Amino acid sequence: MPAAIESINFGFLLDGKWKDDGERIEILSPGTRQRVGLTYRATAADAETAIRAAARAFEVTRKMGGFERQRILRAISAGIEKNSEELARLVALEAGKPIKTARVEVDRAIFTFSVAAEEAVRIGGEYLPLDWQSSTAGRWGIVRRFPLGPIAAITPFNFPINLVAHKLAPAIAAGCTIVLKPAPQTPLTSLRLAQIIEQAGWPAGALNVLPLSNDDAGILVSDDRLKLLSFTGSTAVGWTLKQKAGKKKVVLELGGNAGVVICADANLEYAADRCVIGGFGYAGQSCISVQRILVEQSALTNFSPLWLLGFRSLRSGMYSMKAPT
C-alpha cells in the first residue's frame, strides 16, 4: 500500500458547481481503515437538477465540432498523466488496491481518453446509392450520426478510474452529456477526475458526479430525459435495472465467467502462476477473474501441484509471479 496522503475533502459536481453541504460521507481505506477523504451525499432533488443540467448542456455539446471535443479529450488525458501518481495513490487507498496495479489502471485511463480523442474526429457517415429501381435512378441517401443525448452512468468500486473513463471518454467523444453515480466505496477518484475534466474545458452541466444512495439514484434509470443507461456491476442488479429503464438504450457490463484452458504442451509453471494471479489478484474482484481451469488430462498431474504451491505462497505473502521462459 502507498504511504498515507493528506485527507482530502470533495464536494460533488452539480451543474457546474461543487456542492459541499448535506450528509457527510467519510471514505476509509478498506485495507487499513485509514481515513482517505470526505465527500457529501447527493439527494433525489440533486439528481433532478443534474438531469435538467445535462439536458440543457446537451444543446451545447451536440453542436461542438469534432476538433473541439478532441482538444478537450486530449487535455483530459494530459491532465490525468500530469497527476498520475496522485491518482494512483488515491485509487490504492480508496479501493484497497496495490499501488503497482493502481498505476497500471491510471495509465489505462490516460490511454482511454487518448483513444477517445482520436475517435472524436472519426464519427463519420455514409453516402449510399439508391438506384435500385428506375424511379430512384440518380438518387442518393445520406446517413449521418448524431449524439444520442444525456446519459446516465453507474460505475463499480473495483476500477474506480478506469471503468469511469470507459463511460465518460466515449460520451464526451460523441458529444453526449453525463450524470455519473460512482460507487459508494470509491467516489473520491471520480470526483478528482471530474476536476480534471472540468479544467479541460468540458462545459458546465455537461458532467455531473453525484454520490447518490441507490434509492435516490432510481430516477437515473427511469427518467426518459436520459437517453442511455450505462451500468457496470453485478449480473442481478444489471438485469433488474434494464427492466426498469423503459424505452432508453441500456449498455450492461456484468459479471464474467472467465475460464482458462491448459494444454499439455503449455509452460505449466507459467500457466500456474497466471492462474493464481488471475484468480486471486485483488481478492478476485475483477470482471475477468479466473473462475474455471480446464486442464488437459495428461498435464493434470504436473499442473496441480504447481498451482497449489502458488496458491499457498500467495496466502503466506511470499508470492511473486514469474516471467515466462
Image (tube, rainbow, N blue to C red):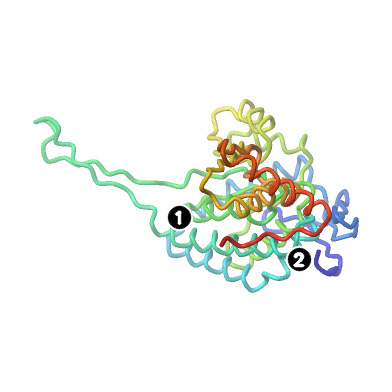
Foreground: 2 or 118?
2
Q: Position of residue 146 (x, y in %)?
A: 42, 46
Q: Nearer the viewer, residue 236 or 215?
A: 236
Query: Horizontal placement of 291 versus 250: left or right?
Result: right
Q: Using the image, tell me which numbered label, if any, was put on residue 63.
A: 1
> How many marks are shown on the rendered structure?
2
> For the residue marked with disc 2, what is the amino acid?
Arg
Q: Quadrant of residue 198?
A: bottom right
Q: Amino acid at mark 1?
A: Lys
Residue at x-position 64% and y-position 74%: 82
Q: Residue at x 64, y 45 (%)?
A: 303
Q: Are marks 1 and 2 in contact (CB under 8 Å)?
A: no
Inter-mark Cα distance, 1 to 2: 37 Å
Asked which secondary structure carries label 2, the reply is helix
User: Percent from the top left, x then y, of residue 141?
Assistant: 24, 41
Q: The N terminus appears in which quarter of the rendering?
A: bottom right
